[in-house]
Image (cartoon, rainbow, N blue to C red):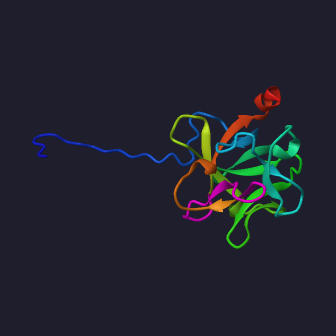
Amino acid sequence: MVLIGTTVILVVTLLYGETAGIDLDKKEFVMSNKKDCKAKLALLGWKPDEVGVQDGELTENQQWYLEANPDKPECFYMSNGRYPKNRLAAQATDGLLSYNGKRYSDQLWKFRPSGLNDGFYYIISCKGADDRRIVMDSTGEKPSVELKTGPFTEDQQWKLVPKEEAVKEV
């Protein structure tokens, strides 16, 4: 193919931090997984390793409060509705856990739209360059959540439903 006198410009935009017009700061959400819409991200207890998914009746431990970091406004702390001092963290050695204490950079998350204009997002750790994402693993006896890298897949997509709307749906 020969192009004479024609300029071709290809622009690729990665939407890290872009939330498709949704204001996330200081808002509370329920996060449902695309692979199983009944599975909601939840803090199942106050211990660090009790991050998981839960279906059924809407409860406080399925509600997440997002707060932007003033130094990195595209990144958010995720605090739990039932355990408000606990924030999700992406630790290199322990994986996904909740942390109650001082704020660290491994507690920051960005929300990347799926690209399908369907209201689903990838929840990606702001720490490091490896794009660790929260994924629901449904291969075991009961679904769990963990951090993954690699290809972007449906089980890594989460719908952010404002708390007020989630309460109406129940």
Q: Which residue is pictured at 81% across the width and 43% down the height?
A: 55
Residue 63 vs residue 148, the one in the foreground: 148
Q: Where is residue 95 in the image (x, y as percent from the top left)?
A: 71, 66
Q: Does residue 19 appear in the picture of this structure?
A: yes
- In the rendered structure, the answer to whether residue 108 lies left or right of residue 129 reads right
Q: Quadrant of the C terminus?
A: top right
Position of residue 93 relative to residue 144, above or below, is below
Say how many tags the image has: 0
User: Quick check: is 140 in the magenta stretch?
Assistant: yes
Q: Quadrant of residue 22?
A: top right
| Extreme residue toward the top, this view | 168
Point out the stretch of residues depicted in magenta: 126-145
Q: In this view, does 90 lie above or below 3?
A: below
Prevailing SS of the magenta stretch: loop
Please state the horizontal and vertical placement of residue 16, each as a whole percent of the image. 54, 49
| Picture coordinates of residue 152, whole percent (x, y) | 54, 53
Q: Position of residue 1 (x, y in %)?
A: 13, 46
Identify the residue at the far front of this view.
141
Quick check: is 44 in the magenta stretch? no
Nearest the viewer among 73 and 77 is: 77
* Res. 74 in view: no
**Residue 46's quadrant in the figure?**
bottom right
Taking the image as shown, residue 130 lies to the left or right of residue 160, namely left
Residue at position x 51%, y 41% in the image = 115
**Horizontal side of residue 46 vs 122, given as left or right:** right
Task: Quadrant for residue 96, please give it.
Answer: bottom right
